[in-house]
Image (cartoon, rainbow, N blue to C red):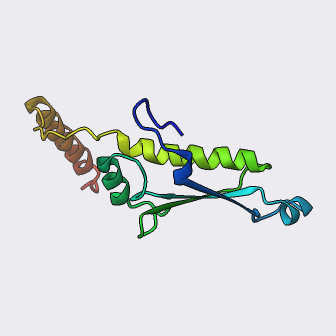
Amino acid sequence: MRITDTIVIDDSEIDLTAIRAQGPGGQNVNKVATAIHLRFDIAASSLPDYLKERLLALSDQRITKDGVVVIKAQQGRSQEQSREEALRRLQELILGVTILPKARRATKPTYGSQRKRLDTKTARGQTKATRGKVAL
Protein backbone atom coordinates (compact mmCIF):
# COMPACT_ATOMS: atom_id res chain seq x y z
CA MET A 1 0.00 0.00 0.00
CA ARG A 2 1.46 3.35 -1.06
CA ILE A 3 1.20 6.20 1.48
CA THR A 4 3.42 8.76 -0.26
CA ASP A 5 6.02 8.61 -3.03
CA THR A 6 8.67 7.48 -0.53
CA ILE A 7 6.59 5.59 2.07
CA VAL A 8 5.20 2.19 1.13
CA ILE A 9 3.74 -0.45 3.45
CA ASP A 10 4.01 -4.10 2.45
CA ASP A 11 0.66 -5.92 2.39
CA SER A 12 2.07 -8.65 4.64
CA GLU A 13 2.34 -6.11 7.49
CA ILE A 14 -1.43 -5.51 7.46
CA ASP A 15 -3.67 -8.18 8.96
CA LEU A 16 -7.18 -8.15 7.43
CA THR A 17 -9.93 -10.37 8.88
CA ALA A 18 -13.49 -10.65 7.58
CA ILE A 19 -16.14 -10.55 10.32
CA ARG A 20 -19.90 -10.17 10.45
CA ALA A 21 -21.15 -6.60 10.49
CA GLN A 22 -23.31 -5.24 13.31
CA GLY A 23 -26.56 -3.35 13.12
CA PRO A 24 -29.55 -3.54 10.79
CA GLY A 25 -29.40 -5.25 7.43
CA GLY A 26 -31.69 -8.27 7.56
CA GLN A 27 -30.55 -11.72 6.55
CA ASN A 28 -27.45 -10.42 4.74
CA VAL A 29 -25.90 -9.28 8.04
CA ASN A 30 -26.59 -12.62 9.69
CA LYS A 31 -25.14 -14.74 6.89
CA VAL A 32 -22.28 -12.85 5.22
CA ALA A 33 -19.00 -11.61 6.73
CA THR A 34 -18.86 -8.20 5.04
CA ALA A 35 -17.09 -6.18 7.75
CA ILE A 36 -13.28 -5.97 7.84
CA HIS A 37 -11.15 -5.94 10.97
CA LEU A 38 -7.73 -4.41 10.17
CA ARG A 39 -4.72 -4.73 12.48
CA PHE A 40 -1.40 -2.98 11.87
CA ASP A 41 1.51 -3.37 14.30
CA ILE A 42 3.39 -0.06 14.31
CA ALA A 43 6.56 -1.32 16.00
CA ALA A 44 6.97 -4.31 13.66
CA SER A 45 6.27 -2.30 10.51
CA SER A 46 8.74 -1.06 7.90
CA LEU A 47 7.82 2.59 8.52
CA PRO A 48 10.66 4.99 9.28
CA ASP A 49 11.42 5.40 12.99
CA TYR A 50 10.30 9.03 13.15
CA LEU A 51 6.86 8.05 11.79
CA LYS A 52 6.58 5.18 14.27
CA GLU A 53 7.31 7.59 17.14
CA ARG A 54 4.70 10.08 15.93
CA LEU A 55 2.06 7.38 15.47
CA LEU A 56 2.69 5.98 18.93
CA ALA A 57 2.54 9.49 20.41
CA LEU A 58 -0.93 10.08 18.94
CA SER A 59 -3.82 9.98 21.39
CA ASP A 60 -6.04 8.12 18.95
CA GLN A 61 -8.51 5.55 20.24
CA ARG A 62 -7.75 3.29 17.27
CA ILE A 63 -4.19 2.74 18.54
CA THR A 64 -3.90 0.29 21.45
CA LYS A 65 -1.39 0.69 24.26
CA ASP A 66 0.60 -2.15 22.64
CA GLY A 67 1.08 0.01 19.53
CA VAL A 68 -1.36 -1.80 17.24
CA VAL A 69 -3.73 0.13 14.98
CA VAL A 70 -7.17 -1.50 14.99
CA ILE A 71 -9.72 -0.36 12.41
CA LYS A 72 -13.15 -1.88 11.89
CA ALA A 73 -14.88 -1.01 8.61
CA GLN A 74 -18.45 -2.17 8.10
CA GLN A 75 -20.14 0.52 6.01
CA GLY A 76 -19.82 -1.25 2.68
CA ARG A 77 -22.30 -3.88 1.54
CA SER A 78 -19.49 -6.07 0.29
CA GLN A 79 -16.25 -7.30 1.79
CA GLU A 80 -14.26 -5.50 -0.92
CA GLN A 81 -15.87 -2.12 -0.15
CA SER A 82 -15.16 -2.56 3.56
CA ARG A 83 -11.57 -3.61 2.81
CA GLU A 84 -10.97 -0.48 0.72
CA GLU A 85 -12.52 1.70 3.43
CA ALA A 86 -10.30 0.18 6.15
CA LEU A 87 -7.14 0.63 4.06
CA ARG A 88 -8.12 4.21 3.20
CA ARG A 89 -8.58 5.04 6.91
CA LEU A 90 -5.18 3.51 7.76
CA GLN A 91 -3.60 5.53 4.94
CA GLU A 92 -5.21 8.76 6.27
CA LEU A 93 -3.96 8.03 9.79
CA ILE A 94 -0.36 7.53 8.63
CA LEU A 95 -0.55 10.45 6.20
CA GLY A 96 -1.64 12.69 9.08
CA VAL A 97 1.65 12.17 10.94
CA THR A 98 3.84 12.65 7.87
CA ILE A 99 2.97 16.35 7.73
CA LEU A 100 5.04 18.34 10.19
CA PRO A 101 3.14 21.06 12.05
CA LYS A 102 4.50 24.54 11.42
CA ALA A 103 6.56 25.94 14.29
CA ARG A 104 4.71 28.83 15.89
CA ARG A 105 6.59 32.08 16.34
CA ALA A 106 5.39 34.33 19.13
CA THR A 107 4.35 37.78 17.95
CA LYS A 108 3.11 40.92 19.64
CA PRO A 109 -0.06 42.80 18.70
CA THR A 110 0.55 45.93 16.65
CA TYR A 111 0.14 49.38 18.16
CA GLY A 112 -2.81 50.05 15.85
CA SER A 113 -4.66 46.89 16.91
CA GLN A 114 -4.12 47.72 20.61
CA ARG A 115 -5.37 51.26 20.07
CA LYS A 116 -8.44 50.02 18.17
CA ARG A 117 -9.26 47.53 20.94
CA LEU A 118 -9.07 50.18 23.65
CA ASP A 119 -11.16 52.64 21.61
CA THR A 120 -13.85 49.99 21.11
CA LYS A 121 -13.88 49.25 24.85
CA THR A 122 -14.26 52.97 25.65
CA ALA A 123 -17.12 53.38 23.16
CA ARG A 124 -18.89 50.31 24.56
CA GLY A 125 -18.50 51.65 28.11
CA GLN A 126 -20.02 54.99 27.11
CA THR A 127 -22.98 53.22 25.47
CA LYS A 128 -23.62 51.29 28.67
CA ALA A 129 -23.23 54.40 30.85
CA THR A 130 -26.12 56.11 29.05
CA ARG A 131 -28.48 53.24 29.91
CA GLY A 132 -29.03 54.33 33.50
CA LYS A 133 -32.31 55.64 34.92
CA VAL A 134 -33.27 59.14 33.93
CA ALA A 135 -33.23 61.53 36.93
CA LEU A 136 -35.99 64.19 36.94
Quarter of the image with the N terminus is top right
Q: Residue furthest right?
A: 27
Q: Is residue 21 above or below residue 8?
A: below
Identify which residue, 100 or 113, lies in the foreground: 100
Identify which residue, 24 or 57, lies in the foreground: 57
Quarter of the image with the C terminus is bottom left
- On the image, the x and y values in percent for residue 97 come to 37, 45
Q: Is residue 46 left or right of residue 27?
A: left
Q: Is residue 100 above or below residue 46?
A: above
- On the image, the x and y values in percent for residue 131 come to 29, 51
Residue at the (12%, 41%) spot, across then down? 106
- On the image, the x and y values in percent for residue 4 come to 44, 33
Q: Residue furthest bottom?
A: 65
Identify which residue, 114 or 107, lies in the foreground: 107
Q: Is residue 17 left or right of residue 61?
A: right
Q: Is residue 122 left or right of residue 4?
A: left
Residue at the (39%, 61%) spot, across then down? 59
Q: How many marks?
A: 0
Residue at the (41%, 70%) spot, across then down? 65
Kindly indicate the quadrant of the structure image that contains residue 25: bottom right
- On the image, the x and y values in percent for residue 86 come to 61, 50
Residue at the (70%, 49%) spot, across then down? 82
Identify which residue, 23 or 30, lies in the foreground: 30
